[in-house]
Amino acid sequence: MGFKTMFGNDSSTDFKYREAVTTYKFISDLMIVMAKYNKKVDVLKTNTGDLFGYDILLNCDNNMKHIQLKTTTKTSSWEIRNSLLKDPYGEVIIIYLQFKSEEEWNFQYRILDKQKIPDINLLPDTGKTKITQTMLEPYREIDHLAYYLFFKNE
């Protein structure tokens, strides 16, 4: 068994394990990229699931991000909590798993472009909104994602 067999199916019965593995790989890759800039990232992983709308909190030089991660091979839409969509520090990142072989995989990232959500400020605080691939930015590597999260407003 390899990565593709274990993680390549969106309806996998082990989706929680896949989510944990991909979350830790994302965190590790992000921390390595940020080290290139001599920056440290503090990470807090929530244990409450989707209760607050985000999976992890990232902090770099007092720049806090509330991150909702979604992992997929082919899903085209996701339900996201309105509270996160309205949160100025909230970000939704879709991790696309790409398999070159059974033992070799690659991550590509797409970030939600909140400007593509109609009347985002008028959404109720509770409830969820469906986002689709058309609301996402193009595929990015981890280096660009680090820039987007922590350097774009400098």
Image (tube, grey):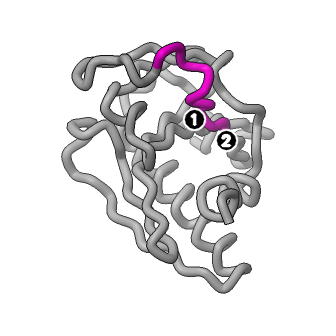
Q: Is residue 148 left or right of residue 49?
A: right
Residues marked 1 and 2 touching at CB (< 8 Å): yes
What is the x, y in percent for residue 18? 45, 41
What residue is pinned by disc 2? 109
Q: Is residue 9 left or right of residue 58?
A: right
What is the x, y in percent for residue 38? 66, 85
Q: Nearer the viewer, residue 10 or 27?
A: 27
Region rendered in magenta: 109-119
Quarter of the image containing the N terminus? Answer: top right
What residue is pinned by disc 1? 94
What is the x, y in percent for residue 121? 41, 24
**Pointer 2: residues within 10 angstroms few (<14), some, or many (20+)?**
many
**Pointer 1: residues within 10 angstroms few (<14), some, or many (20+)?**
many
Q: Is residue 112 magenta?
A: yes
Q: Is residue 102 above or below residue 56?
A: above
In this view, the residue farthest toward the bottom is: 38
